[in-house]
Amino acid sequence: MQISQIKSINKKIPSKKALSLYLILAVFIFLNWGFINRLLNFQAAQIRDYIQKEFLEIDSLLFNQAHIDTMYIIFDEEELASINRTRVNVVRRYLKSGEMNIKKHGYHDSFIMYKNYTATSEIKLFGMNPDHYFKNKTSYRIKFRGGDFFAKKKVNLLSPKTRSYQMDHIMNQAYKNKFNAIAIEQVPIILSVNNKSKGVYFIEDFFDKYLIEKNNKKESFIFESGFNGKFQGSAPISKLNNEDGYFNVNTLPKGKKWKNISKRIIDLFHNNNPNELFNIIDGEKFNAVIGLCLLAQDHHPLLDINLHWYYNTVNNKLEPLIRESYIYKISPDHTIDDIWKKFYNKTKKEPGLKLIKEWMDYQENNKELIIQSALKSALYIEEYITTDKYKRFISQLNKEFSYNLYKQNIVLKHNISQIITKINLIKNNQTKYDSTVIINNNITINKDFIIDENTTLIINKGVSIKLSDNANIYIYGKIFALGEASNSIKFIGNQNSNSSIYINSNESTFNFCQFIGLSALNNNLKVPLFKDLWTTSSAITLYESSNVVFWHCSFRNNQVGDDMINAVSSTDVAFNNCSFENIVADALDSDFSDINITKCKFILIGNDAIDGSKSNIKVKQSYFENIADKAISVGEESVVSIINGKIINSEQALVVKDGSLLNAKNIKLENNRMDLIAFSKKEEYNSPKFNIIGCTIINYLIDKKAHNIGEGNYYRTSQSIQDILYGEQYGKASEK
């Protein structure tokens, strides 16, 4: 071999020094591969987002786009710099060790402008996963300090990507509209931070009292059961009973009652006896959430750190919420059994799905019930994605995410088709037969009397039903109490007993019935598991009931409770020729309900005669006398019409507040301390309106925000009307 060839070969052979360097580099790459991989993925994701944004700004011009509002956030430069440093530290920590963010961030002062509203606020970084910390799409949590529209709400500002673009929206719409559940809303906006556009974001509801009220649910709390309190969400299960924590904010109402309930919930989640916990879980809603996940082939919303629960005080049930939904394609070759097996087997392998597995095994027919829920949701979504509401939502997101929306829409339609075509309506193996219970003679009830959903209770004329020993009547089926004018039916509560009637019925009638001496549902004196803490505000509760008629009935001398009757989420409820007399507090309280009241009398009422919250109420030819507080109270976006009536010798005749409308026509008002009051009580609602026709208003209080759309000119006071009500100068002392 020639010397020149040898030299040439030697040049191609690395020296020992070079080999050592290569070896060190290889070892470094090997030891730090996780870091390098996360760095590359993180940067690649940002590059993809950038390329996608640039491309879709052109592509989105192909779509008809709806208007989208802009939210402006203004920080002091030092505050903004501090937020950015925190974000960078979170990213560095993730790139170095893969650690998700579980640390609480501090709040920063800010100023918000949105639509025609302004507010001061506090803002912090939000989110556990790294997709919340991309430079161009950082997630925030805002805590408002009050003011019109904003009130003292909390909201999240998120990239639509973190909520899988349209998926969370679709899932929550199906869940709410088909199963009467709480929906978490995402509203598309353009976000501007210190006059720099951040593109399309979601305003997302926070887990607080505003979310509960927005979804027409009674005051209670929302909590999450996983992650031992480290997750930045609602009140963690471990902190529910911590006075120094969540009892001092909006997450939990205050009071001994709530503390006892929260303690019991903690016990149920941690006592390793799932049957006890499952007794108070709303089975229909839990199956619905699992069914939605089956449709999407995604377990993520079911992980214990993602599952959030609302405690429903009206029916004593825990209702799950659905969030962080993704979607994966169902194999077209799979049968419904294959689809189920794949879904079910995943639950057995994932530690965070232990509760779901236990629930699936809890009932023999749970599989069929969940599959039916999936079908029900699929049929709804198939229709919903053709509506103008959904098209507007998509059009707003198309400004930035059209390609992602298109891809997910293909998978969604595919899965819907698979579920609908592969599922025959599955009926329970056990056939349920309707039955009838007839009461012809007087009886005494000294333990809870329950009529289930497949049973009809008939009570014939002249029967007296006495309730003692704190016994209650629960009607989940139908009840027809058929009294006559000369031979009425009596429901009588013992003076030494707190007894109540609970109605969850779609068709019931009470003719010529007397309700005497009843009290609010209160099981505090009983021992059984969770039921002993179940209380309601009323002697008679109507919950999710429809087509219920009270005809020629009298309600009097109730003993304990805020209300004689409380209608909650009920429709087509009618009171004709009824009387309410000597009532401890409110006579008739309506929450999220539609009620007709005709030719009724309200006399000697200890608080409000009729109180409406997010309700539609029509009152005709009715009489009110000696009402200790408000004869007609219209609040929280209610519409109440009162025609051809009389209100005399009462503290406050007509009161309207908080985005509500009061229509009053031909009402005689005599010797009332105040004939009309209109004011704004809660900041989150619009101004109230009133339409007064044919009424002589002598004494009144109208604040500067109230709108008169009827007859007469009324002076608007600049003073805070709320400060002089509720027993301060006018009305009866109560919670403001």
Image: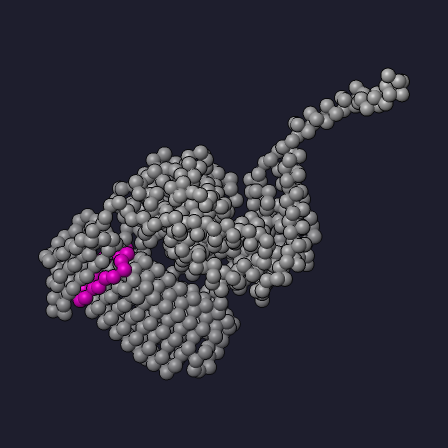
Q: Nearer the viewer, residue 307 or 467?
A: 307
Q: How is the image coloured?
A: one colour
What is the number of callouts on the image?
0
Q: Which residue is drawn at 32% across and 48% down?
A: 426
**707 part of magenta stretch:** no
Does residue 349 sit above or below 390 in this rendering? above
Q: Which of 415 and 693 is in front in this view?
A: 415
Q: What stretch is highlighted in magenta?
A: 503-520
Left or right of 160, for residue 227: left
Q: In this view, does 230 lie to the left or right of 344?
A: right
- Residue 730: give x, y in percent of width and height: 40, 68
Q: How far across and down, in percent of the image, does residue 451 sit?
A: 21, 52
Residue 344 seen in render = no
Residue at image coords 64%, 49%: 49
- Camera-nearest residue between 572 and 591: 572
Residue at position x 15%, y 54% from top?
Answer: 437
Residue at the image position 49 percent from the left and 67 percent from the top? 686
Q: Is residue 9 left or right of residue 57?
A: right
Where is the N terminus found, in terms of image quarters?
top right
- Residue 706: where, in percent of width, then height? 48, 73
